[in-house]
Image (cartoon, coloured by chain):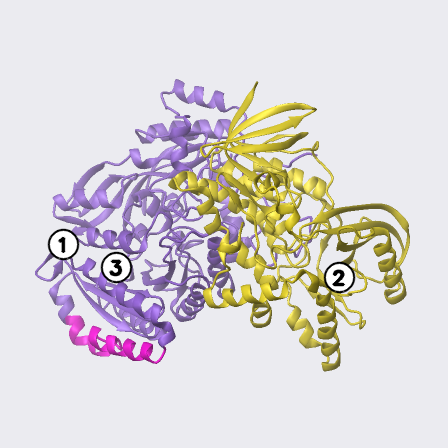
Amino acid sequence: MNEIITDVVIVGSSLAASGCAKRLVDAGFDVIVLERHALPRHKVCSGILSPRGHRFLFENFGPLPREILHEPTFCKGVTFHFPSMVSIPMDFFGGPTPHLNRQFSDYWAIKRSGAAVHEKTTFESLQDDGKSVNIIAKKAGAEIRYKARFVVGADGPKSRVRHSVYPDYNKTIPWFMVGQKFQAVIECPLDDDYFHFWFHPELGYYTWSHARNGRQILGVGFPLGGNLHRYHANVEEYVRNKHGVKLEKAEELEGCSHNFGPSLINRYVFGKGNVLITGQAAGFFNMIAEGMSCALHSGAIAGESIVEAAQSNRPVQQVYRSLIASEVRRCTDQWNPFRIIFSNPHEADFKAALFKLDKQDQKLVLKDIWRFLKIYAPYKWGRQILSQSLIREINGEYLPSRWL
Amino acid sequence: MQIPVIEPGCIPPDPVSPDSLKGIPRQQTNPARRSIENWKGFVEHLRSQSVLVREEKSESSVFVTDAGGLAFGLPHGVVRPNSAEDISKLLKAAQRFRVPVTVRGGGLTTEGESVAFGGILLDMSSLNKVLEIDTKAMTVRTQAGIFWHQLAEILRREGMDYLSAPLNLTASVGGTLGVGGIDVNSPRLGCSCDQAIELQVVTPTGDIMHCSETENPELFERVLLGYGQFGVITEAVLKIRKFSPLTMQYYYYASLTTAIEDLQMLSKADAADYAGILTILDRAITLLVAFDSDERQKDFEKKWKPKLRGHGEFGFGLLMAKYYLLRPWKIEEALYIVSRRFTLFPEFNRAEFMRDGKIIDRTVVFSRAVWKFWGGRQMVIPDLSAKAEKFAEAVERGNAVCRKYFKYYTLYCVGIKLKGNLPRYEMSCIPPDASDIAYGCEFEPMLRDTDYSRDYLQSFKNEIYDIGVDMGLSYYRFGGMMKGYIRSVFGDELVEKHLAMKKAADPAMILNPDVIF
């Protein structure tokens, strides 16, 4: 049987894969990207990239072509809405940020990375013999074998690579579902330039809205098993009554599951031996559920680690786990109460916006946030966040021993 | 979907929003490998002219990154020239076939300036002969691919020495003349590039030209500090001097600002032959001064020493002891300073390099110490250069950034004497508002055995560069400056002016294409 031999196989062709592929191709590695769909493929995503991610795209792949953006092409910042009807708009520090059309942005980035992409090829399993990794994939029903020195799993929340390394992992974490519906606008007083987010415990675990290509997106996140239509109807009614958002019947809907949680409590998964896990598969997720910028950066770090490990002849896991520490700090700091109070780990200034409110509103907002956070109580993250945050303050680092 | 190709020097409009990425470089800094249309034809053409292009991966992968270690790229082929004629043939062919050529000497750039993102890597280290030492005119004619330590070694055989070279002596002469080159005697003698009397240059279109202040002065001014944009330096005639041993003295400060004021006082008055500041964090600040002759030293001790506010070693030790006794939680920092003191200083006074209390070989002493105690495989050394009035503030602000990112670091400050108001200083390491003496500071984290992601190191460097943009400074560019910053630092008008000159000199934009434009 034919076996394809290469330096590195990256599973997934999303932004984490592009970041990783870019680093490896630049350093002269032969890289094959396995993508189960035909490119450019559709992806469920809000598309609102953080300025840090924008900068990464720019510096590594060049100016963004118009085709990879939705309308409006940019997002100025985030507006938080609270049940007490206080709304706080905040601009991003780095200026307006792109509203990516993930179908084309991911395609553009992976093409610009210079890696070879094997489309319609589904990763099945792998075996790491210490020197190289043997991979079995399927294309149109036929089995294809690959042999690579390193494998990078950049295949998202339901990572198959992660599953083949840690078969039981998926059962150990809580899963969330997010769904969004696209609706034509009758009347929408929400500012198109902002991403809108509701801290409302009765709406959902994560409720948002923004404009795209002349329609309005209403989205909601909830624990796996919930009913999207019920949650969505509830949100739609709420924004109609409270914000005057009148929308036509939904024309389209889409949804996907998310592994929200590991980045809050410093429980990342980075792989074993010559298999690296990166991006959202590793657990990277920014606060307002933006995963693209940390996917790009963690993916790049996985690539750098392979380059560095090959150059210095060190075990790749050791290098990866020390290089990734900066990204872990940056991502987990966003949930660290000490960092939130005493510095600013986010890309917009919530504290300043809060201080601008009058005392009465400040109290209402803080109360609302507290009520909202309480819906996460069953996951028992609070103590873990606190203990990890304390260790971070004393030690300067999050504990690597908590990573898988 | 079509993936657009972006020509160098061209900044397409931003489709996201005109004000996105505020204050952030608007140029790609980590370019993709260029695809070259007729690579085979190009290689064949050169072979027919007996210029060998080495295409093996084992050849090209040696040059995959530079000292900065943040940018990676592979050339399609490597050329090691035997003569200026080889380079001329190469550049003529490169213009015709539109193949980018990246020139590399010691490869000590830090932002990927000597990394080839495809095309040809021109490895200048093969042109490394000293051609003539003229002890009457006090000049040396040398091929430009030579490293400074090789040049120093050959000059020493004649009892001669170079004037000023970068502290890192594995830099090549040609590369140094292209970027500046700063030494601890720069407050007296200026950049290394100011020692050049005459150059042989291969222009981007392949003409071999000689230039000096009188012959082709325009080319001379463009090539010096020109960052490799206007020609490849193949030979240089440099000023030299008689070799002399030197004596070094140290003064210790607890305050950066005071030390900087004293450094500026000495530099302005030309009180010492060498003067610079080296620090351990921002706690132990050492002002070092050195002298080539006993007369200069006596003169200094009489006139300037009493005015210095630094302490002797013992007094400073007491001061530090008091500081850390009151702050016992900083014990780790205190121990670091002590250990650094006891390992570093003896290195400057090693018996094999000393005679009668004088350093007899600064080349060895400096470069050894630099590599043993500051260098590593990766150099992360962003820097700022400022006119005298702005300098202290720039250093303080940079210091705060170092504190934020790293546990241990060093600052290195030095003056840079200007040779007058020369065109070469435009868009260079010399800040536009400086006159007489500019000052530079390097911010150097001690990376030791810690691994950092490229993003972390780059973010650190960007924060230093941001200070430069904010305060209207320039950069030493000992190791380079991130390409995207050049427009925000020097302004569009000046950059466009240089871009127009570049386009005229290099129509296909092939010579060092990813460095500035």
Q: Disc 2 is attached to a residue of which chain?
A: A
B326 drawn magenta = yes
Q: In which quarter of the image is residue B144?
A: top left
B305 drawn magenta = yes
Q: Colour of chain A?
A: yellow
Q: In which quarter of the image is residue B47?
A: top left
The residue identified by callout 2 is A197
Q: Residue at image x 44%, y 68%?
A: B400
| Element assignment for label 3 | loop
CA gap between label 3 and label 2 equals 59 Å
Q: Residue type at mark 3: give it.
A: Asn
| Element assignment for label 1 | helix
| Element assignment for label 2 | strand
The numbered dot on residue B185 is 3
CA gap between label 3 and label 1 equals 20 Å
- Return the x and y of residue B123 as percentages of the image width and height: 35, 35
Q: Mark 3 packing: few (<14 Cα in 10 Å), some, or many (20+)?
A: many
- Return the x and y of residue B435 as percentages of the image width and height: 38, 64
* Front residue of A238 and B104: A238
Instruction: Give the magenta-colored segment's residue range.
Output: B299-327
The residue identified by callout 1 is B353
* Front residue of B124 and B61: B61
Q: In this view, does B400 lie to the left or right of A280?
A: left
Q: Disc 1 is attached to a residue of which chain?
A: B
